[in-house]
Amino acid sequence: MSFLVIPLYLDLLTDVSFGIWLTVSAVINWFNFFDLGMGNGLRNRFAQAKAEGKKELAAQYVSTAYALIGGISAAILAGFLIADLFVDWAVIFATPEVLARQVNEMAFILVMLFCPQFVFQLIKMIVTADQRPALSNLMNTLVNILQLGALFFLSVRGEVNLPELAIYLGGINLAIPVLANIFLFSGIYLDYRPRIKYLDFSLSGKLLGLGMTFFILQGAALVVFMTDNLIITHVLGPEEVPAYNIAYRYFNLTAVVFALVTTPFWSAFTEAYVKKDMVWIKKVVKRLLLLWALVSAVAVAMFFAAPLVYTFWIGDALEIPRVLNFFMMVWVIISTFLSIFGTFLSGLGKLKISLFYAVFIAVVNIPLSIFLAGFPALGSAGVILATLIGMSFRLLFQPAQTLKIIRGTATGIWNR
């Protein structure tokens, strides 16, 4: 689906308007950061409660998390409505004057649709914590299929403006989580559905205690990954964003496949650690490393096949620099390797060292990205190179910490 939508976008939008759409959409996704890590906190706490057979406690975590996220969503909405009175979003996104009105309307529509989605998407954390990642992936797949259908309909119909695109695609993003909540909480998760009687704000500390750790980690991820489009827009121009995004989607395909395998193990590691089944953990980590070797070989093959694939995929609509392809390939290889250890440590909540890294990367990534993107030989490739440089520091501690925990030799900060 991710591949098929690109030619439709290029047919419907100009390079500039497509770049603006990608940038604004990425910035709207920043608001996910404001869950204060409670989504992942709920994921771990729900998995722990179920593993220990504490059904009512699991239900209390769900109801409390929904109430807290609902309050945050209302605050985001209020804050945006106030800011919207004074901020010209077209200036923020370096928009040509001819598109200024469309961009302001698009930003308003996307935020209005995002705020309720922010609450309803908690269902994905619940099903993933329950080791049913196929349900979460099914929701994403349905969204992608419906969005592809909407784009196809719009391309057949002809000209489309950015606010209309926001209504179609943002509406689909909201509809699927809403329907999933109705269906799942009236079916397999009936006993866990949010209810006032299960509200227990004394559990907020547990959700936020672990959640604040994830909050800082999410903040670092926000700085590293979600600012890319905005940096490219302001340093190189919005017309450079589509090429970067297309190269990212192409190479990220292998990372997506790898994530489909590793995602279930987050909560599985939580359960195994609670039950002290280190033999199973060791076996799974070894198998994931073998899969990573295969994924790395595929990424290398994709690098050499890239020019042919791009020609078949988007024709001559855009030129994707070879240096950009190379650094995207290296990023996939390193990020998939580190995701094994990141998933394990997140499942166990052993993230103290990762917190120090997160603060470091949040400070250095944006200035380094701007600096490297300014080199003509690099351009947008400098942004992903900055990500690679920052990511490489995780190689110094995450594999070692994982090994120490598995062997039972982790002490002090290595076990926190």
Image: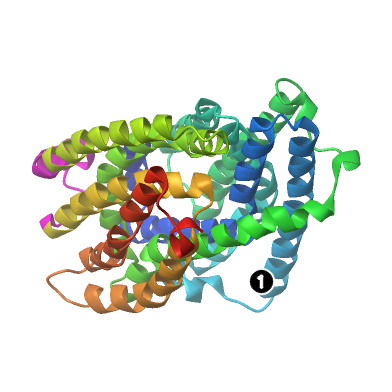
| The image quarter in which residue 261 lies | top left
In the image, 20: left or right of 101?
Answer: left
Give percent across and percent down for residue 323. 13, 59
Q: Residues within 10 Å of mark 1 (few under 14, many from 20)?
A: some
The foreground one among 288 and 137 is 288
Magenta span dominant secondary structure? helix
Is residue 319 something one can see in this rendering? Answer: no
Is residue 63 something one can see in this rendering? Answer: yes
| The image quarter in which residue 326 lies | bottom left
In the image, 74: left or right of 376?
Answer: right
Q: How is the image coloured?
A: rainbow
Give percent across and percent down for residue 351. 49, 58
Give percent across and percent down for residue 203. 78, 52
Residue at 67% x, 67% y: name it.
80
Residue at 34% x, 36% y: name it.
285
The foreground one among 41 and 225 is 41
Q: Amino acid at mark 1?
A: Asp
Q: Residue furthest right?
A: 197
Vertical relation: 275 (above or below) 99: above
Q: Which quarter of the rendered picture does the N terminus lie within?
A: top left
Residue at 67% x, 74% y: name it.
83
Over which residues does the magenta segment extend?
302-322
Q: Residue furthest top?
A: 187
The stretch drawn in magenta includes residue 309:
yes
The stretch drawn in magenta includes residue 11:
no
**Disc 1 element:** helix
Report the residue marked by disc 1.
84
Residue at 72% x, 59% y: name it.
72
The foreground one among 238 and 349 is 349
